[in-house]
């Protein structure tokens, strides 16, 4: 239940890159706010200039490193009756970007929360990927540590929905390679970078193809990966030779044998005993 004199928290969906994607409501809210909390204040000022908006608001930075400490200050301003707008570099606040802590704190304090919807890298990449869009899941950024990343991918090995990930250009080649080893080299994927910007590019192919391409020609800018869901095992592919080779590839990449056999069993839709027998047979040859 909100207090009568409380302010309002407004989440602003920012253009991914092209300022022409800004809604008229975004312009209105930027001009109406008492406080604008921005992930990057320089980028915000550039957007304000491009939209020809002259704000009367106090502009403050609100990014990953200071989000926890600055939330209390913004909440106090909301309690004082101010209209606080939160904007990130692109897309909707809280979605792999700052904003969640303040939304949760505002709700707990009874402060109204609303939003001015805008562009989304998730749905934009999904639509451009050519993958099924009727059911999908968003996984955000994959873990940076290789072991944690492989565990996540192992948990998703039988996910049937299309999967959407964000990734850094510095890590995308390693991520695609880890995906190829866990999901299989022939799994379809789309790499979408710099969406709506001048150098927008969509690379489509298999995980093996895009992993090789990312190593030979590293993509730059903001990247969204769209991965096809699991369609079930193909019994004709589950040969002892193929399973043994898959285990060997995972071991060569640093995965321990037990985990490698488990991942290969999931990939081929067989038991771990089948994989174990395939590995033993290959070692005897």
Image (cartoon, grey):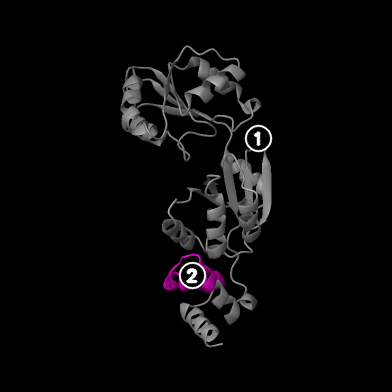
Please identify, in this view, whether the residue under mark 2 or under mark 1 is nearer the observer.
2
Image position of 79 (left or right of 266): left
Where residue 56 appears, as percent x and y from the top left, is 47, 11
For disc 2, the marked residue is: 251
Q: Main secondary structure of the magenta part?
A: helix
Where residue 167 appears, as percent x and y from the top left, is 53, 46
The residue positioned 53% from the left and 59% from the top of the image is 178
Image quadrant where one finds the C terminus? bottom right
Residue 256 among magenta residues: yes
Image position of 159 (left or right of 82): right
Q: Residues within 10 Å of mark 1 (few under 14, many from 20)?
A: some
Residue 189, quarter of picture: bottom right
Give the vertical position of 127 relative to 11 (above or below): below
On residue 196, which mark appears?
1
Image quadrant where one finds the N terminus? top left
Where residue 196 appears, as percent x and y from the top left, is 65, 35
Tell which of 13 and 197 is nearer to you: 197
The residue positioned 43% from the left and 34% from the top of the image is 98
Range of magenta residues: 247-268
């Amino acid at each position: 239940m909100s207090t009568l004199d409380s302010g309002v928290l407004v989440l602003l969906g920012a253009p991914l890159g092209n300022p022409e994607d800004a809604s008229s409501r975004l312009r209105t809210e930027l001009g109406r706010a008492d406080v604008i909390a921005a992930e990057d204040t320089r980028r915000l000022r550039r957007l304000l200039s491009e939209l020809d908006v002259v704000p009367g608001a106090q502009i403050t930075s609100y990014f990953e490193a200071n989000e926890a400490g600055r939330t209390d200050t913004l909440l106090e301003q909301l309690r004082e009756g101010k209209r606080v707008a939160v904007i990130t570099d692109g897309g909707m606040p809280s979605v792999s970007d700052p904003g969640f802590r303040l939304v949760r704190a505002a709700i707990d304090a009874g402060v109204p929360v609303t939003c001015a919807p805008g562009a989304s890298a998730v749905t934009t990449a999904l639509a451009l990927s050519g993958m099924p869009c009727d059911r999908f899941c968003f996984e955000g950024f994959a873990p940076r540590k290789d072991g944690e990343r492989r565990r996540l991918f192992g948990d998703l090995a039988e996910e049937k929905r299309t999967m959407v990930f964000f990734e850094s250009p510095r890590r995308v080649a390693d991520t695609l390679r880890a995906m190829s080893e866990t999901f299989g080299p022939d799994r379809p994927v789309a790499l979408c970078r710099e969406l709506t910007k001048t150098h927008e590019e969509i690379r489509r192919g298999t995980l093996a193809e895009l992993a090789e391409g990312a190593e030979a020609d590293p993509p730059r800018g903001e990247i969204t990966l769209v991965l096809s869901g699991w369609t079930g095992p193909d019994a004709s592919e589950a040969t002892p030779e193929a399973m043994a080779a898959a285990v060997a590839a995972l071991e060569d990449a640093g995965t321990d044998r037990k985990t490698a056999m488990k991942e290969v069993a999931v990939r081929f839709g067989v038991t771990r005993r089948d994989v174990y027998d395939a590995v033993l047979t290959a070692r005897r040859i």
